[in-house]
Image: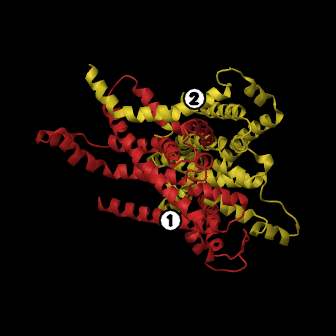
């Protein structure tokens, strides 16, 4: 039965070959460089893990991703809930707003925050009026965090909404007819049913945040460097390719690690299903 | 409880939407820096955008790269979706994983990988290099959309055409392809937008010669130098608003029609 296989490979072959040669091979090249190429060495990894600055950045990256994910969840859940549960004109409008902000370029949104939080912007003017003569808003952890939340919140809302939209409202009516108050119906019926969406949204936001480059670099200060910013710095200043490659491998392994846990618990196909 | 939840949702919606509006007055500002509120208004930076080759060339590059990326992506992904969904073969799961793999790798990691890899073939700073990278990045989403459309397609239509005497090619051309067209258009649109918006890989591998619009925008925001960034932001933002509103009404109309 070789023939059907041949036909299948004629169809999937080009895409497979393209991704293998032009996606897997570049990653392989990076792995190769990270261990010093033909003169095998682990010194780049040793440098990374023995430099306090790099370890701090790695820890800060995970911490930021955690905080941003948590804030996105707290802000995103009510929005998804109103869209899915109440619908109507307000739900439609909220969905439109979420879609618009999702489709607006990261750079446009980063620029908007730069103006709002900048030295000659409205927030600083307000703080001046309130009596703080020299407030520092832009290039702070606060600015980087608010920028990241603004950027990633739409993904959280969409992931939760996608699951909520499939929850049958009859479940809630059944709970109510059995005597549950709206609060306990939500806690015991709706919340557990929406949990897969929460998990999807959190994993999505967390892994995007782990490797995010643009916003922390533009809005945060030097102390807010995430590991992506560190890698970017190495490339721009043509410093140390081996070290940059080792840093990238650490980031890649961290990202794949989160996805592997998700895969083991939920199944990877659910993330984009 | 309901009014509280609605209030929170409305406030979060405002937090998402209102900050983006600031780019509109900024684009008419006559200030040389990022001052808000603007000291005065004019449209000088709009004419500057359309006449300054440092902005028009990256814009053109982005259109060229996104168009080429869309074509290559679709040429790879459509046959792959047919192959994966309609055939059982050895290595099928591996091919499926490979198609999704670019979604799982942070863009900065890919930026470095492509910088090192394309550099060996002297492809950094070329259109071809960026198109290659963008095709890999666009492929998973486009593949998912085409595959989802193909899953929803009723194969009995094909059987009907075949039993009415159409050959496999005519069946594909007159029955399968028209039914899949909407899904394929959406996939192509996603691939285009994905490439047009992609920033991180472009920053590091496009160089001056193949610089894309996002790369140019990133530079000008970082240097806080060029007020034209407000014009570009306003144009892109307007494009998104028009597109989402049109898409929403179009979907409403078609869903009423059926």
* Residue B53 in the image, given as x and y percentages of width and height: 57, 65
- Where disc 2 sits, the SS reads helix
Residue wearing tag 1: B239
Q: Nearer the viewer, residue A198 or B26?
A: B26
Q: Nearer the viewer, residue B93 or A162?
A: B93
* Residue B75 in the image, given as x and y percentages of width and height: 37, 43
What label sits on residue A188 in the rendered view? none
Using a 10 Å C-alpha cutoff, classify the residue at mark 2 as few (fewer than 14 neighbours), some (14 to 19) or many (20 or more).
Answer: some
Q: Is residue B189 left or right of residue A64?
A: left
Please name the residue shown 61% across and 41% down the image: B111
Q: Hue of chain B?
A: red
Foreground mark, 1 or 2, reads 2
* Residue B10 in the image, given as x and y percentages of width and height: 60, 63
Looking at the picture, does residue B130 appear above or below residue A125? above
Residue wearing tag 2: A28
Q: Quadrant of residue A2?
A: top left
Please name the residue shown 42% across and 61% down the image: B247
Q: Hue of chain A?
A: yellow
Please name the residue shown 84% across and 70% down the image: A128
Q: Quadrant of residue A1?
A: top left
Please name the residue shown 66% across and 52% down the image: A149
**Can residue A97 be spotted in the picture?**
no
């Amino acid at each position: 039965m070789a023939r059907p296989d041949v036909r299948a490979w004629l169809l999937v072959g080009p895409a497979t070959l393209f991704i293998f040669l032009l996606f897997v091979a570049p990653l392989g090249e990076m792995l190769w460089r990270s261990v010093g190429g033909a003169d095998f060495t682990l010194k780049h990894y040793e440098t990374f893990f023995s430099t306090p600055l790099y370890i701090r950045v790695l820890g800060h990256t995970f911490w930021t991703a955690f905080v941003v994910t948590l804030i996105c969840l707290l802000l995103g859940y009510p929005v998804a809930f109103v869209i899915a549960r109440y619908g109507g004109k307000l739900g439609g409008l909220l969905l439109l707003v979420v879609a618009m902000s999702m489709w607006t370029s990261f750079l446009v949104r980063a620029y908007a925050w730069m103006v709002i939080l900048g030295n000659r912007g409205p927030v600083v003017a307000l703080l001046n009026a309130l009596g703080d003569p020299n407030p520092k808003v832009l290039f702070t952890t606060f600015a980087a965090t608010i920028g990241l939340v603004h950027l990633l919140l739409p993904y959280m809302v969409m992931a939760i909404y996608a699951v909520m939209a499939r929850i049958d409202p009859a479940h809630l009516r059944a709970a109510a007819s059995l005597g549950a108050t709206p609060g306990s119906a939500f806690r015991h019926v709706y919340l557990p049913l929406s949990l897969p969406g929460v998990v999807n949204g959190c994993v999505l936001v967390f892994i995007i945040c782990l490797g995010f480059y643009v916003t922390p670099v533009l809005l945060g200060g030097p102390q807010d460097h995430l590991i992506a910013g560190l890698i970017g710095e190495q490339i721009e200043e043509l410093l140390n390719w081996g070290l940059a490659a080792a840093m990238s491998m650490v980031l890649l392994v961290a990202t794949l690690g989160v996805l592997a846990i998700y895969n083991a618990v939920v199944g990877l196909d659910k993330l984009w299903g | 409880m309901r009014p509280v939840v609605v209030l929170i949702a409305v406030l979060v919606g405002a937090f998402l939407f209102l900050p983006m509006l600031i780019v509109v007055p900024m684009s008419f500002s006559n200030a040389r820096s990022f001052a808000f509120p603007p000291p005065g208004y004019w449209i000088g930076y709009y004419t500057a955008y359309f006449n300054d080759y440092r902005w028009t060339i990256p814009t053109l590059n982005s259109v060229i790269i996104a168009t080429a990326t869309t074509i290559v992506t679709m040429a790879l992904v459509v046959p792959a979706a047919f192959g994966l969904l309609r055939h059982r073969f050895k290595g099928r799961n591996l091919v499926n994983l490979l198609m999704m793999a670019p979604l799982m790798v942070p863009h900065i990691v890919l930026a470095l990988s492509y910088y090192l890899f394309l550099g060996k073939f002297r492809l950094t700073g070329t259109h071809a290099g960026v198109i290659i990278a963008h095709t890999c990045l666009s492929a998973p989403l486009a593949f998912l959309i085409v595959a989802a459309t193909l899953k929803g397609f009723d194969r009995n239509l094909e059987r009907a055409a075949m039993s009415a005497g159409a050959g496999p090619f005519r069946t594909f051309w007159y029955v399968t392809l028209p039914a899949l067209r909407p899904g394929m258009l959406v996939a192509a649109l996603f691939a285009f937008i994905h490439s047009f918006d992609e920033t991180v890989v472009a920053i590091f591998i496009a160089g001056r010669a193949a610089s894309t619009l996002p790369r140019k925008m990133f530079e000008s925001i970082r240097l806080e130098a060029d007020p034209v960034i407000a014009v570009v932001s306003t144009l892109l933002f307007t494009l998104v608003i028009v597109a989402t509103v049109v898409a929403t009404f179009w979907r409403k109309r078609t869903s009423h029609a059926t």
